[in-house]
Amino acid sequence: MRVLVTGAAGFIGSNIVKYLESKSIDTVLFDNFSHSNYYNILDANGEVICGDVTDKNFYQSIPEVDAVIHEAAITDTTLADDAKMVEVNYNGFLNVFNFCIKKNIPLVYASSAGVYGKADKKMSEQEKTIPHNTYAYSKYLCDCWSRKYVKVNKTPPIIGLRYFNVYGPQEVHKNKSASMIYQLYKQMSRGKRPRIFKFGEQKRDFIYVKDVARITAEAINSKKSVISNVGTGRSRSFNDIIAILNKLLKKEYKPDYIDNPYQKVYQDYTEADTTILNQFLGTKAEYSLEDGVRDYLENYLCYDQ
Ligand SMILES: NC(=O)c1ccc[n+]([C@@H]2O[C@H](COP(=O)([O-])OP(=O)(O)OC[C@H]3O[C@@H](n4cnc5c(N)ncnc54)[C@H](O)[C@@H]3O)[C@@H](O)[C@H]2O)c1
């Protein structure tokens, strides 16, 4: 079996490639290297193709593959260029989507919990979504398109995965868009008090990238189309992260609380309803926040001083 991974040199894409290759699945790595780190794929065995998913003829460079995992996107949610965001994230998605339809091969693509906007209860796939920024809107468009298309056409399985807050190795190139776990670790490991928005009780469903990579890779075996959340189902506060990091680093830093300038559009709370993930895709996250952060620190971040 050979799987095309777009966005393969990015954070999640490169972890997916690693997971697939560990299961002896051949890979083709596609990326335009606009927001990536080639170090992430130094050990990969698959063919590397430098190309752009917005190029309508991108498929001409692709060898025969049996499935596609589409991760390529602009992931900096603060990018002010709306046209570019929608072009890459939605038009790029449509190109990949049409490629899979034409070849009759399964597509697993990265959507986002961002589509839900602000919420005060668990986020469920059946509920109305109100994206609060153009990034989230671009993912919303992908979900709307695939839902409508599979309803009226016979298609190969199309699996949309709404990732929640992913953290873990190979995210360093994301800078300010990297996870809260990485940002807080960076401050605390350099002797600084961790800075968070007042008063640290914002809650997110943090999921370790090793779970995300496994769940995404396994989703290519789904027989039916679906849109599923990918989260742990348990939301944790920023104060919790600081407590976990303090324990692992043997420190006692008190948070430095600052005002949140993005309050209007800020997701104070994300938590995945995991019913579809558990029952339809038959899987779940295995790492608790404590286990994931420990693995991340002990096996990866300790080398990033
Ligand atoms: N990291 C998270 O917490 C999170 C949460 C929800 C959804 N997602 C989604 O998961 C996917 C992967 O995100 P990530 O965190 O690994 O981000 P990332 O920025 O590390 O990876 C994106 C990759 O896509 C590539 N890329 C960008 N534009 C391209 C184009 N036009 N053609 C080809 N390649 C292009 C970049 O070079 C990069 O390697 C994205 O679709 C993102 O929207 C991520």
Image: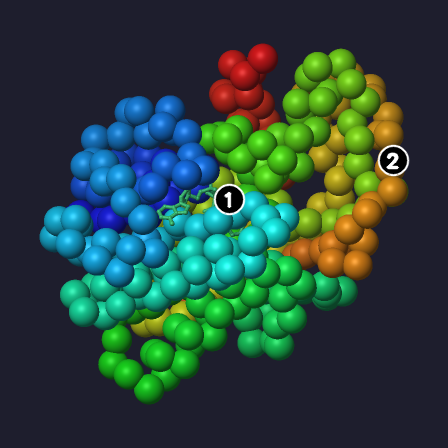
Residue 82, x across and y down, in percent: 56, 58
Write the residue at 19% across / 41% down: 26
Where in the figure is residue 262, as x and y percent of width and height? 77, 51
Lower position in the chain sequence, tag 1 or tag 2:
2
Evaluate whether residue 116 shows in this view.
Answer: no
Colouring of the image: rainbow
SS under mark 1: loop
Residue at image mark 2: 257
Q: Is mark 1 within 8 Å of ligand 1?
A: no
| Residue type for callout 2 | Tyr
**Residue of label 1:** 286
Q: Is residue 51 left or right of residue 78?
A: left
Residue in the image at 69% along x and 17% along y: 189
- Image quadrant occupied by the C terminus: top right
Looking at the picture, how far across and down is residue 100, in whole percent? Answer: 24, 64
Name the image quarter holding residue 182.
top right
Please tell me whether mark 2 sits on a helix, a strand or a loop. strand
Q: CA distance from mark 1 to mark 2?
A: 31 Å
Nearer to us of marks 1 and 2 is 2
The residue lying furthest to the bottom in this view is 152
Amino acid at circle 1: Glu
Residue pictured at 61% horizontal, 76% vertical: 127
Residue 300 position in % (x across, y down): 50, 22
